[in-house]
Amino acid sequence: MQLQPHTDRARVLHTYTRVHGRANYIVYGVGSKKKGAGAYAPLSLVELTIRDGHGGKPSVVEQTQLIYVPERTTYDVKRQSVALFLAELLSRVLYQPMQDEALFDYLMTVITDLDQCDDPENVHLRAMRGLAARLGFAIDQERYPLLVADPTSRSMRQEQLRSLCNYYADHVDGWRELNSLEILMQVFD
């Protein structure tokens, strides 16, 4: 889930849904108590009530209800950094408005794992490997042993992360560098 400015009063909410795949909606009054600003944090798991747009108008979020509150991610800088990184990654690779319940369930598992695991330092690496397989470009273990190994040091983790981003760049049309990559590397430095 990611918000981008639309007008002074509205934001565009980019989501990945169980039913529609990638979907974008207009949200008014983000930040007000009525709209629940916390529901729009990166990787929030929410249930949305949508008013369908008619006559070329976009669909609008009428109500938001959190279905999973990531307690540890909310207050942990490392987990927040991973969440921002994964949200940006997902916005770059999930752009099809088609239903894929297995992918949706996988993403829910990644989000809850990030919040519940003891050490968040490798969650994004595991998520990238699993996501690549679900998007149709699984990593060949014999050809790319570095990409599938569990990192044992900070330098190996950083090298693997850069290599995974390069791997995605080779397999995703229109790939752009992730702005949050350097921030994530600094947080785990």
Image (spheres, rainbow, N blue to C red):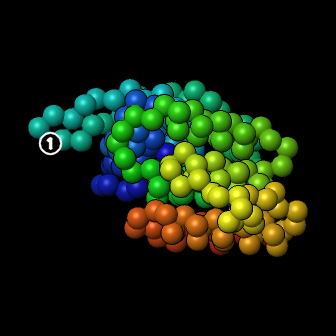
Quarter of the image where one finds residue 23: top left
x then y, percent, for residue 149: 79, 59
Residue 129 visible in the picture: yes
Q: Position of residue 26 (x, y in %)?
A: 32, 43
Return the x and y of residue 3 as percentages of the image width and height: 44, 51
- Which residue is located at x 40 percent, y 34 percent? 99
Is residue 33 shown to the viewer in this render? no
User: Could you tell whether 135 is left or right of 5 in the image?
Assistant: right
Left or right, 153 with respect to 99, comes to right
Q: Could you tell me which residue is drawn at 14 percent across and 42 percent down?
A: 56
| Residue extending furthest toward the right | 152
Q: In the image, 151: left or right of 47?
A: right
Q: Which amino acid does label 1 sit on?
A: Gly
- Which residue is pictured at 51% across the width and 69% down the height? 170
Q: Identify residue for label 1.
A: 56
Element marked by disc 1: loop
Residue situated in front as seen by the camera: 43 or 108: 108
- x, y percent for residue 37: 52, 41
| Residue placed most toward the observer, 169 or 3 | 169
Looking at the picture, does residue 65 appear above or below residue 57?
A: above
Mark 1 surroundings within 10 Å by alpha-carbon count, few (fewer than 14), some (14 through 19), many (20 or more) = few
Q: In which quarter of the image is residue 153?
A: bottom right
Is residue 180 placed above or below 12 in the rendered structure?
A: below
In this view, the residue farthest toward the left is 55
Look at the picture and state if 84 lies above or below 154. Answer: above
